[in-house]
Amino acid sequence: MIKINCDLCGKRAESLAKVGIEGVQLDVCNDCARFGKVVQQPKRLDAKSQVMRMKSQARQKEEKMELLVENYAEVIRKKRESMGFTQKDFARKISEKEATVHKIETGALAPPLSLAKKLERFLGVRLVEEYEESHETSKGRRINGFTLGDFINVKK
């Protein structure tokens, strides 16, 4: 029998009950069912529906991030210059401070994603890339989420 995870605690269980918890319906184990109102009694899922549920959960847990391109400062500066704007005029057009534009173009400030997308629309360049990552252990099992090691840069 294939076991599936409880939506609340993550514990593997053979049968799950559909429970309303704070306005959301979740499939939870018998232990977690006490935290809400039981909408549907526990039922055993056949193997096919369990596999389909696990596959859909795996697809939902893909890590997607939006990151700035490495040479964002150079791309912004070159495009602004090709359009014939000074930093002051450009800042006024996009409703930002001139100092902010200067810091972004020198690379001293990485623009927040909202500003980067605003710059993309105005300049017609690509500054934000979507990055998708999946983590696996040495035994081929999937690790859900990022670890601290994913963010550490080791200087050699």
Image: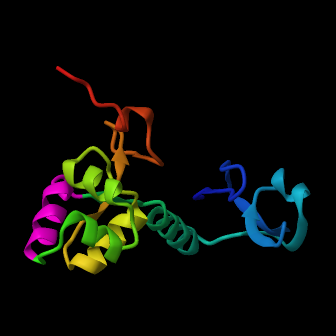
Give the residue at x 12% y 78%: 83
- Along the viewing direction, whichever of 83 and 29 lies nearer the viewer: 83
Residue with the most extreme top position: 156
- Quarter of the image where one finds residue 127: bottom left
For this view, does 67 lie left or right of residue 60?
left
The C terminus: image quadrant:
top left
Asked where in the image residue 149 lies, by quadrant, the reply is top left
In the image, what residue occupies the spot 48% across and 48% down? 144
Residue 86 in percent (x, y) is at: 18, 68
Q: Nearer the viewer, residue 31 or 85?
A: 85
Extent of the magenta region: 69-82
Task: Note whether 145 is above or below 27 in the view shown.
Answer: above
Q: Residue 5, percent across and down?
A: 63, 55
Rendered view: 132 above or below 11: below
Compared to residue 79, the image places residue 13 above or below, namely above
Q: Nearer the viewer, residue 15 or 70?
A: 70
Q: Residue at x 66, y 70 (%)?
A: 45
Residue drawn at x 82%, y 72% as measured from the top left: 23
Horizontal arrangement in the rendering, residue 55 relative to residue 40 (left or right): left
Residue 100 image offset from top left, x and y in percent: 34, 55
Residue 73: x percent and y percent?
A: 19, 55
Q: Which image quadrant: the N terminus?
A: bottom right
Above or below for 30 versus 43 = above
* Residue 11 seen in render: yes
Q: Is residue 12 magenta?
A: no
Magenta span: predominant SS is helix
Residues 78 and 61: in front is: 78
